[in-house]
Amino acid sequence: MPRAVLGSNALMVLIGLLLIAVAAGFTADVFVQNAHKVDVDVLGRTFNVRPGWLVVAGFVTFAVFFVGARLVVRGVGAARRRKKVLRNAEVAARERDQLAQQLAVERRSSSEGVTVIDRTAEVAKSAEREDAAKAVPSSVD
């Protein structure tokens, strides 16, 4: 790994630790410096709390929001991956069917002694029939 990348990782860790220390210092200052109580209305009820507990409530609220956002992102990602896998499976099935059809035509023509030009025309006709069948919408679409 290049030295510059290692240096930037160490810098990010240092900045993260610095931000954590600032947040902890702010929380401690709010708890220590503000001894008077504040009335807080929550869900129709009034609570008399110290301002430090408002900071704690903010942290808890952020944590709950963050967990919810992560669940949404993971769920959307899983749905996308599932849709992609299904789409790839449908393409593979269509390709498999087309190859099986071509193989059947080649086997039939080799046993009957049909020329290569005739085989190509027959494969093209079968592909046209398959395309016409795809044009009809189904319940899967």
Image (tube, grey):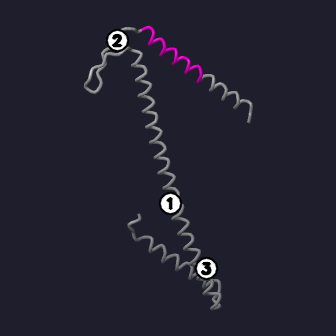
Residue 100 falls within the magenta-colored stretch: no
For the stretch drawn in magenta, the main secondary structure is: helix
Give the left or right position of residue 4, taking residue 74 as reference: right
Q: CA distance from mark 1 to mark 2?
A: 58 Å
Looking at the picture, how far across and down is residue 51, in whole percent?
A: 39, 14
Residue 37 got which mark?
2
Q: Which residues are magenta?
A: 16-33
Q: Badge 2: how crowded within 10 Å, few (<14), some, or many (20+)?
A: few
110 over 58 or under it: above or below: below
User: Which badge, 2 or 3, is on the more N-terminal residue?
Assistant: 2
Spatial CA distance of label 1 from label 3 is 25 Å
Q: Which residue is mark 1?
A: 86
Kindly indicate the quadrant of the structure image that contains residue 2.
top right
Closer to the camera in the image, 95 or 25: 25
The residue mark sitting in front, 1 or 3, is 1
Marks 1 and 2, the one that precedes in the sequence: 2
Observer-nearest of 28 and 76: 28
Query: First in sequence: mark 1 or mark 3?
Result: 1
Question: Label 2 amino acid?
Answer: Lys
Tell me the kind of residue under disc 3.
Leu
Q: Quadrant of residue 41?
A: top left
30 part of magenta stretch? yes
Residue 111: horizontal and vertical position, in percent?
64, 90
Which residue is disc 3 drawn over? 103
Q: Residue at x 53, y 68 (%)?
A: 93
Q: Neighbour class for label 3 at 10 Å: few (<14), some, many (≥20)?
A: few
Residue sticking out furthest to the bottom:
112
For mark 3, give the secondary structure: helix
* Residue at 35% in and 16% down: 49
